[in-house]
Amino acid sequence: MHKLNRQQRKLAKRILKSNHKSKVTYTISIAPSGFVKLGTAYYLDNVMIKMKYHKCKPVLGNVKSVYLNKGVHNTNPITGEKIPDLNDIVLSYHANVRKDERVIDDMELYFTIVCGLWTNQSCAKKVRRKYHLEDKEVVVEWSKTGVEVISVWSIAPVYNPNFISRIPELSNELINSGAHNFSAIIMCKDILTRVMAADPVFNQQFRWLQDAYQELESGKKFAEDIIEKITQIGLGIQSFIRLDLLNYWYRHDHGLLRNYSLAASENYTLHIEILSKSKELTDRQKQIFKTWGLKLHKAWDQGSFNAPDMGIGGGVDDVEEGYNRIILVFDMTEFCANPHSYARELKKCKLGAA
């Protein structure tokens, strides 16, 4: 057994301490009688940690080996040939349904098979591999006649049931990385557009306030009476949005403020606001979002600006001078098709409450 080097020990220690690691049970060997000897590993961020024993605590002293994906090119485990082309791989009905539910596209799935770390999932009668790349895991069954994807999923929290209940964990991680405050809201994707279309007065005030905020950000100075008007209109709109439009609202400084059920027929957006001395996310904060599955290239509206005294919607209030709001908006249909499993609690319920 090889002794772990410094980098391997550091990786193993970080991953085993993480709440985001994925426990993987894999096949070590298959006896002639068909008995399968099992092993345990932990996977996160393209690193696989294999343990000495199948049932042992995930601590550094029990680590057997550490594998880092440095550019894997997998082959057919039966023939040793290269992985078939994308169009030659069959999706089982179950895998096809899960792929669509979890909004995983074909190329993500294929590259996971081609380039991911793998663990043996075989039994006496079937040759199976589980491939791991970034936050994706794909189970594939191999035979002499072809290859079939059995299932596919993401281990990132945003793709999984009950993600909403873990938002306080996300908040804590960002605060520990240097953020001054944190707010997260979930609201119907086009609710503001509907309200603006139905209420001309609200439409006029909201657009005026948006223009005023942009001018403030660009450095324009307003007279005291105009500042007072901005404040009053802002407070009115803020109160309306907070009372009537938010399905979910969590703030680091106040805890959970709103948690209403989501309608399966609606689409929703997640608005995350971070208060920071910086106008941009730090590298550590970017990594946190990546680990949670909230990939920044999927944020369809993002930016930062000097924070006024109060937020328009579910943001933070009483902001000290010199802080910036960093705002990220995610369309939740990018992570989960309806009916919004990310909002579903991991518990039994009566049929009428499902």
Image (cartoon, rainbow, N blue to C red):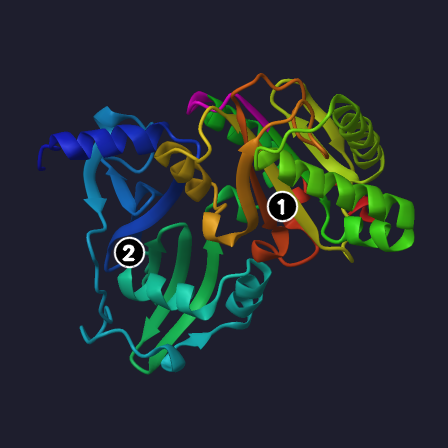
Does residue 318 lie above or below 283 as drawn? above
Query: Where is residue 203 shown, x and y percent of the image?
Result: 84, 48
Residue at which label 1 appears: 342
- Tell me the element at label 2: strand
Please indicate whether residue 353 sits to the left or right of residue 71 in the image. Answer: right
Please indicate whether residue 260 sits to the left or right of residue 213 in the image. Answer: right
Q: Earlier in the sequence, mark 1 or mark 2?
A: 2
At 39% from the left edge and 77% from the top edge, which residue is drawn?
89
Query: Where is residue 218 shown, x and y percent of the image?
Result: 57, 37
Residue 263 visible, this angle? no
At 22% from the left edge and 69% from the top edge, which residue is drawn?
75
The image quarter containing residue 118 is bottom left
- Viewer-side residue, 111 vs 309: 309
- Tell me the element at label 1: helix
Query: Where is residue 16 shown, x and y percent of the image?
Result: 33, 31
At 32% from the left edge and 79% from the top edge, which residue is drawn?
85
Residue 325 visible, this angle? yes
Classed neighbour count for the residue bearing mark 1: other residues with Cα under 10 Å, few (<14), some (14–19), many (≥20): many
Task: Identify the amino acid type marked 1.
Answer: Tyr
Query: Where is residue 161 shown, x and y percent of the image?
Result: 60, 45
Q: Is residue 181 magenta?
A: yes
Task: Identify the amino acid type marked 2.
Answer: Trp
Please indicate whether residue 93 sits to the left or right of residue 9 in the image. Answer: right
At 75% from the left edge and 39% from the top edge, which residue is drawn?
209
Please indicate whether residue 343 sits to the left or right of residue 63 in the image. Answer: right
Residue at which label 2 appears: 118
Residue 183's label in the rendered image is none
Does residue 234 lie above or below 271 as drawn? above
Q: CA distance from mark 1 to mark 2?
A: 27 Å
The image quarter containing residue 197 is bottom right
Magenta region, residue range: 176-182
